[in-house]
Image (cartoon, rainbow, N blue to C red):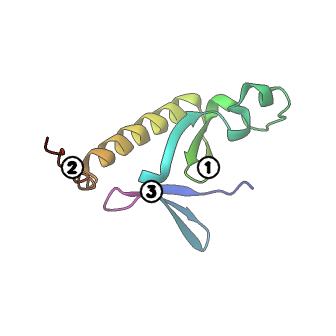
């Protein structure tokens, strides 16, 4: 389903929030598995020729989200899409670095001989 939306980062830089009329949908950056050029159904080469898309694939960026979900953004130009894609990848990498790390697993003591 295609909807006009505005995307913004929240103040903690942890969520991409999609603003649609009368609703907001946060997407946790830690749940984004990949940011890819093209539409979700055209990312797989086998589907490219079968897809009669109304959007040029080079103007689309798709977020692949944990659980098999995806969001495709359509931009006015390939250059705008590239800029969005690069910025989002940098923000995701930076947020991964600053995310709290789980404590290391306890080590087992080696059996004494």
Sequence order check: which comes first, mark 2 or mark 1?
1
Residues under labels 2 and 1: Cα distance? 41 Å
Where residue 44 sits in the image (x, y, percent)? 71, 30
- The reply to whether the C-beta atoms of the residues labelled 2 and 3 are less than 8 Å apart is no
The residue under label 2 is 107
The residue under label 3 is 8
Where residue 81 sits in the image (x, y, percent)? 54, 35
Q: Main secondary structure of the magenta part?
A: loop
> Which span of residues is magenta-colored?
9-15
26 w.r.t. 51: above or below:
below
Q: Residue furthest front?
A: 113
Q: Nearer the viewer, residue 52 or 14?
A: 14
Q: Nearer the viewer, residue 87 or 28?
A: 28
In-image side of 77 versus 48 (left or right): left
Q: Name the front one of labels 1 and 3.
A: 1
In-image side of 67 versus 87 (left or right): right
**SS at circle 3:** strand
């Amino acid at each position: 389903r295609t909807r006009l939306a505005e995307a913004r980062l929240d103040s903690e830089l942890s969520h991409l929030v999609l603003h649609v009329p009368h609703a907001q949908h946060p997407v946790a950056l830690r749940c984004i598995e990949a940011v890819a050029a093209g539409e979700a159904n055209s990312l797989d080469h086998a589907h490219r020729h079968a897809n009669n898309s109304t959007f040029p694939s080079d103007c689309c960026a798709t977020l692949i989200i944990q659980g098999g979900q995806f969001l495709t953004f359509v931009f006015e130009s390939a250059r705008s899409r590239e800029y969005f894609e690069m910025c989002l990848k940098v923000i995701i990498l930076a947020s991964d670095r600053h995310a709290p790390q789980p404590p290391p697993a306890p080590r087992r003591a080696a059996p004494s001989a």
